[in-house]
């Protein structure tokens, strides 16, 4: 049986069975039938992610009511809120490509951030 190679059949839609037979020497992700090549995370990426996780854990243990991460490269804002039981919720992600409506703080009354203004100079 011939294996459908996502690198050679660019633009084709694939199913999970085909995905399972792809060569394991490259990283691929299947999203809605489309093949996406995924680069291995760089050392910088891993270091930044590690810092974010440590802060997330520290802020949660310290009962910080709200945690915001602003990513100027991805043009996104993610906000987590502390819920009863002392844990952060699943978070709310706003991305430039999708929904960039204003975000109101639940911890600081009257604070509203408009991501369009926040990233306006990056356009």
Image (cartoon, helix red, strand yellow):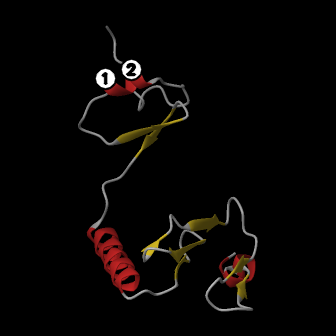
Q: In what quadrant of the picture does the N terminus appear?
A: top left
The percent position of residue 53, horizontal first and vertical second, equals 34, 74
Q: On the rendered structure, is 84 left or right of 52? A: right
The percent position of residue 68, horizontal first and vertical second, equals 53, 80
Secondary structure type for disc 1: loop
Residue 80 higher or lower than 3, as above or below: below
Q: Residue 42 carries which label?
A: none
- Distance from label 2 to label 1 (Cα)? 7 Å
Q: In which quarter of the image is residue 76?
A: bottom right
Question: Closer to us: mark 2 or mark 1?
Answer: 2
The percent position of residue 23, horizontal first and vertical second, equals 27, 30
- Label 2: few (<14), some (14–19) or many (≥20) C-alpha neighbours in 10 Å: few
The percent position of residue 87, horizontal first and vertical second, equals 43, 73
- Label 1: few (<14), some (14–19) or many (≥20) C-alpha neighbours in 10 Å: few
Q: In which quarter of the image is residue 51?
A: bottom left
Q: In what quadrant of the picture does the C terminus appear?
A: bottom right
Q: Report which residue position mark 1 lands on.
A: 21
Question: How many labels were placed on the picture?
Answer: 2
Q: Which residue is drawn at 59% across and 66% down?
A: 93
Q: Are marks 2 and 1 in contact (CB under 8 Å)?
A: yes
* Residue that sits furthest to the top in the current view: 1
Residue 43 higher or lower than 111, as above or below: above
Q: Report which residue position mark 2 lands on.
A: 17
* Front residue (pair 60, 12): 60
* Residue that sits furthest to the front in the current view: 85
Residue 123 higher or lower than 98, as above or below: below
């Amino acid at each position: 049986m011939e294996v459908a190679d996502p690198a050679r059949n660019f633009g084709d839609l694939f199913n999970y069975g085909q995905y399972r037979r792809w060569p394991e020497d490259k990283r691929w992700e299947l999203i809605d039938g489309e093949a996406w090549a995924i680069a291995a995370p760089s050392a910088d990426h891993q270091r930044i992610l590690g810092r974010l996780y440590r802060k997330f854990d520290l802020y949660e243990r310290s009962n910080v009511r709200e945690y915001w991460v602003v990513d100027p490269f991805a043009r996104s804002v993610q906000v987590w809120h502390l819920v009863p039981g002392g844990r952060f919720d699943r978070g709310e992600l706003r991305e430039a490509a999708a929904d960039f409506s204003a975000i109101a703080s639940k911890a600081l009354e009257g604070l509203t951030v408009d991501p369009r203004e926040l990233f306006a100079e990056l356009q």
